[in-house]
Image (tube, rainbow, N blue to C red):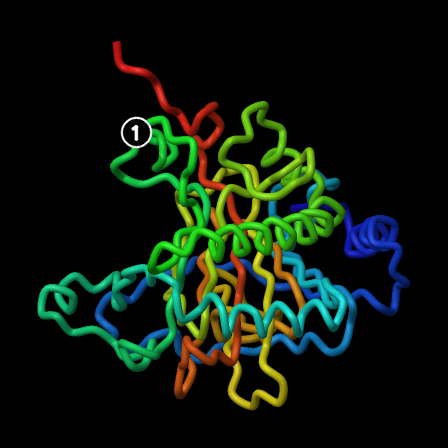
Amino acid sequence: MGFGSSQQELLSKFEEATKLQRHQIQIVEVEEIRFKINAKTQECNPGYPDIDLLNHKLTVIIKKNCNYFEKYLFSVVAIIKRDVLEDKEVENLQTYLKEEILPFCTKNDRPCCSFNKGLKEQGILCKCQGNQNTGGFTATFGCTRTGFSKGLCKYQKKLQTNLRRFKLQGKDLKKEEILQETLYNLADSVSNDFEILTPEAFQNMSSQKSDHCKLGHQQKRPFTAVTIVADYTAHCHKDYRDIKGGAAVLYTIVKKDATNTQKHLMLNYKLKNNSFDGICFTLPNNSLLVEAAYHEWHGSTPLNNPNGVDPTRIGFVFFQHSGLTQPLHGYVKKK
């Protein structure tokens, strides 16, 4: 994600990389703590001390490392960048998703209280996603690795020429083609900022020779999948299937005049000189967040009335699972 011998050095690095002026960049130092899941509680993602992102174009959250060489004394935890797309692009994307895509998404089955096995066995689930039919949800498109694919792409079982990697309810292939093109273009835009902000993570994710699993049109493509989150509450987790040397990128769209919005949580840090564990911050409209989701405990706060059909917040989580580097999605013809 990035490192430096001092806050000043990190500030200078981001100034040079982004061409922003110093007053447009915010540096926030946090302290790393040992986060421990409380499997007995039924409370989902309670409130934590809030980081005020103010109106800076770029916010860089950093931590101070102990017992490291001086050049690695400070390292980057997360980066938030504003103004990713043009305003009209954001408006068109939001309208398109609300009218053409969200009503036809196949929702992922993601149980709540995932750390409390007793509650799951009893069928007791929290209500953070709201109504089962119209509440918050997620839908994933592209190539991922599952527990049944032996560490390879989920499409590796048989050779197919017309994979429905952007499958929607029904069989409107034209609609799926338009969705693919939309998400490819967004992946390209996000990748450009990703490369500028975290070049090493970008290189680690885009250096593979095989690109059958990749999203986008550009020569270097770091992502293999994108999860659309619509008013969805992500319970605290680490993305253990992600590539270790990379990062996940979350692009956010927020409805105009929204008063109750979600906050992003990072639970293994706390603000300096603060007795409360955990940090959170509101991601602005048309912003992107970069974090090493493999390493960080992260999640989001629940909304009072989540509505996946007409969401307050739409997020696009771009990521790459490890092992998705084989040609033809890892397909091997049986002898």
For mark 1, give the secondary structure.
loop
Which residue is at 44% across, 75% downward?
A: 231
- In front of the other: 296 or 206: 206
Which residue is at 78% across, 68% downward?
A: 57
Q: Is residue 225 left or right of residue 12?
A: left
Which residue is at 88% across, 63% downward?
A: 22
Name the quadrant of the C terminus: top left
Residue farthest to the top? 335
Q: Position of residue 174 (x, y in %)?
A: 49, 53
Q: Position of residue 148 (x, y in %)?
A: 25, 36
Question: In the figure, 147 relative to 51: above or below?
Answer: above
The quarter of the picture where residue 219 lies is top right
- In front of the other: 278 or 324: 324
Q: Position of residue 89 (x, y in %)?
A: 70, 67
Q: Which residue is mark 1?
A: 157
Q: Of the residues shown, which amino acid type is indicated by label 1?
A: Lys
- In front of the other: 80 or 52: 80
Residue farthest to the left? 122
Q: Is residue 153 left or right of residue 113?
A: right
- In front of the other: 40 or 99: 99
Question: In the figure, 73 relative to 206: above or below?
Answer: below
Which residue is at 50% across, 64% downward?
A: 266
Q: Position of residue 141 (x, y in %)?
A: 44, 51
Question: Label 1: few (<14), some or many (≥20) within 10 Å?
Answer: some
